[in-house]
Amino acid sequence: MLRKIKNVVIKIFCFLWVSSVCSIGAIPKEEAGVGMNGFLAFGLWVLCIFIMIKIKPWIAASISTLVVTVVGIVNSEMTWAGFWESIELPLGTLLITGMLIKLFLGAIDEWEDESNARNERKKNAQKRGEAYCPWCGSVSIQYYPLGIPYQDYVGSPIQRLNQKYHCNNCGRQW
C-alpha cells in the first residue's frame, strides 16, 4: 500500500516538473524563457507524459529538462560560463528537492517494512493459535478479568468492571 502511495507521489512530482519545464520552454526569450516553438514544447510534453506512463517518470523528467536546457543554450548567445551562472539556483533547488524526496521516500520504506513485519507477526500468531494484539501483532498480551487497575484523581485505587486485554508491546487496551 505504501509503495503505491510512493509511486503516485513520484508520478505527481514528475508530472508537475515536466509540465513546468515544457511551459518554460514555450516562453519567449524576451520574457526570460527559452524561446522554444510552442508546438515543439507541447510535443515534448506529450512525449514526456507518454514516457512517464510507459517507462519511468524520472526518465521523462530528465529528458524534458535536458531538451529544454539544450534548446535554451542553442537559442541564446550565452557562453558556457554564463550558462553555469544562470543555472546555479535551479540546480540548487533541484538538489534540495531531491534530498527531501529521498528522505520522504526513505520514511515511506520504513513504514512499509514495519507494516509488513506487523502483518507477518499477526499471520504467525494465527497459525500457532495464539492471541495477539490487533494493532501491533505482538503475542505479549495480558488479560485482566476484572479490568485494568488504575487510580482516580483522588488517589484511591479503583478497577473497571469489564474485562480487558493489555498489549505489553504497544500499550493498547481492548
Image: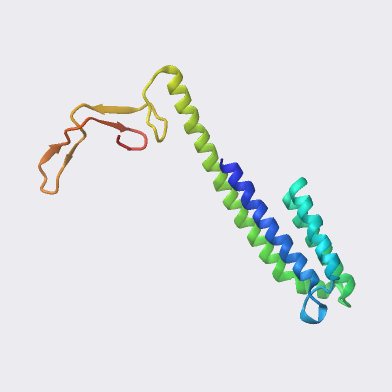
Q: Quadrant of the N terminus?
A: top right
Q: Position of residue 100 (x, y in %)?
A: 60, 57
In this rendering, would 38 be left or right of 146?
right
Identify the residue at image location x=10%, y=42%.
156
Q: Position of residue 35 (x, y in %)?
A: 84, 74
- Please indicate whether residue 152 sits to the left or right of residue 67 in the image: left
Q: How many marks?
A: 0
Quarter location, residue 77: bottom right
- Vertical placement of 110 versus 32: above or below? above
Q: Residue furthest bottom?
A: 30
Quarter location, residue 152: top left
Q: From where the camera sits, is residue 55 visible?
A: no
Residue occupying the point 36% across, 23% down: 131
Q: Is residue 149 above or below residue 37?
A: above
Q: Residue at x 47, y 22 (%)?
A: 124
Q: Position of residue 108 (x, y in %)?
A: 56, 46
The colour scheme applied to this rendered structure is: rainbow
Residue 8, how many percent across, how many down?
Answer: 63, 49
Q: Is residue 87 above or below residue 112?
A: below
Report the side of 172 relative to 36 (left or right).
left
* Residue 104 visible here: yes
Check the picture and name the quadrant holding the C terminus: top left
